[in-house]
Amino acid sequence: MNRVVADSNVYVSAIVFGGKPMLLLEMAEEGELELFISEPILSETFRILRNKFQRTTEQLEADRVHLATITRSVTPTETLIVVPLDPDDDRILECAVAAGATTIVTGDRHLLGLGSFRGIKIQRPAEFLGERQDHG
């Protein structure tokens, strides 16, 4: 089974806009993949939802409960410095390494520019979903 780490922007897009990022969350809900998250990713996701999209306390709590039911939390044990231009991206890589992830799903150009990291594929949501349909 695919072990996947999504970055905060994928979660924000899924929650606010739906679309392909929401399909990723639905696949996790249906047990088609394992979706891993860490505290730094959660914190950034909720900071963006609160500050940029003015989600209410009630909405944020519902989002938190939903994510808690479809993700598995990991605590990274290794500190990485791979993306000096955007240290937040390193938190995604740390989570993926700790989770033993096969894929990172992101729209972030710095991460996508890596292509892969320690054998972990880095893909856009559409690319990941398209690959799943081709093989599923």
Image: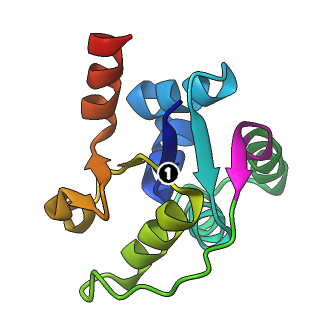
Residue 109 screen position, x and y as percent: 20, 61
Looking at the picture, does residue 98 appear above or below residue 31? below
Kind of residue at badge 1: Val
Q: Nearest the camera: 98 or 111? A: 98
- Tell me which residue sits at (27%, 81%) in the image: 83
61 lies above or below 125: below
Can you tell which quarter of the image residue 110 is in? bottom left
Q: Position of residue 30 (x, y in %)?
A: 66, 19
- Identify which residue is drawn at 57% across, 22% down: 32
Residue 3 position (above or below residue 87):
above
Q: Dot 1 surroundings within 10 Å: few (below 14), some, or many (20 or more)? A: many
Residue 4 located left or right of residue 41: left
Reading the image, the residue beneath label 1 is 5
Q: Could you tell me which secondary element the residue under label 1 belongs to? A: strand
Q: Which residues are magenta?
A: 67-73
Q: Quadrant of the C terminus?
A: top left
Residue 66 x, y percent position in the rendering: 76, 39
